[in-house]
Amino acid sequence: MPRAGLAPAAVVEAAADLADEVGLDALSMGLLAERLGVRTPSLYNHVDNLGDLTHRIAVQAMHELGDAIRDATQGRAHTEALRAAAAAMRTFVKEHPGRYDAGNRARTTGPDDPLLAAADRFLGSLSAVLRGYRLEPADEIHALRALRSVLHGFATVEESGGFMIDADVDDSFTWLVDLLDRGLMSAGRAGHPDPGTR
């Protein structure tokens, strides 16, 4: 039965859910129309094409991921904030692999692209975690890129089933986050040495 009152937000949400289920590469307008109980042409009243749809999924994903990290780290600082942020990102990738994939593939289309604000929300949430480490301003962007890259790498390898060695993956994740924590603490101390050691 066709869905009454279908709106762009509902189309994007259904598409994001479908991408999580079948994978972003398998997402199609026809498959989405079937899921929504409408004819495929009716979807074009709400989105321009598949590229527009996946871009909207990316925007939604970056907002959601930024909010997940922000909520997980609320009231926490330093090591505890790092652990909470890392766990939140890992969980998001596990639970929403399709939309996370869309967020990573998307590229901005111009200064008014809503993806810019969405990406800022995500990166802002990660940046807030780094504040407790007292990094030098010149090092902050490097630390942010390192943190994002490491967490992305672990989560996507895990989600794709790439960890095949017989060792506990949770233990590896804890070890990795502890390594990040020690590295960030070391970088912070290097930028703000104890006056008594000079």
Image (cartoon, helix red, strand yellow):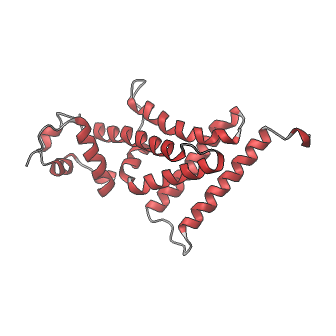
Q: Residue furthest front?
A: 75
Camera-side residue of 198 and 147: 198
Residue 148 % position (x, y): 55, 46
Residue 128 location, quadrant: top right
Q: Is residue 15 left or right of residue 79?
A: left
164 w.r.t. 94: above or below: below
Residue 63 location, quadrant: top left
Camera-side residue of 92 and 84: 84
Q: Is residue 115 left or right of residue 21?
A: right
Numbered label tally:
0
Residue 153 % position (x, y): 53, 54
Q: Quadrant of the C terminus?
A: top right
Residue 78 % position (x, y): 65, 46
Camera-side residue of 122 and 32: 122
Q: Is residue 7 left or right of residue 117?
A: left
Q: Residue furthest bottom?
A: 166
Q: Residue furthest top?
A: 111
Q: Which residue sits at x=30%, y=39%?
A: 51
Q: Which residue sits at x=67%, y=41%?
A: 132
Residue 85 % position (x, y): 54, 48
Q: Which residue sits at x=59%, y=47%?
A: 81
Q: Residue furthest left?
A: 1
112 w.r.t. 79: above or below: above
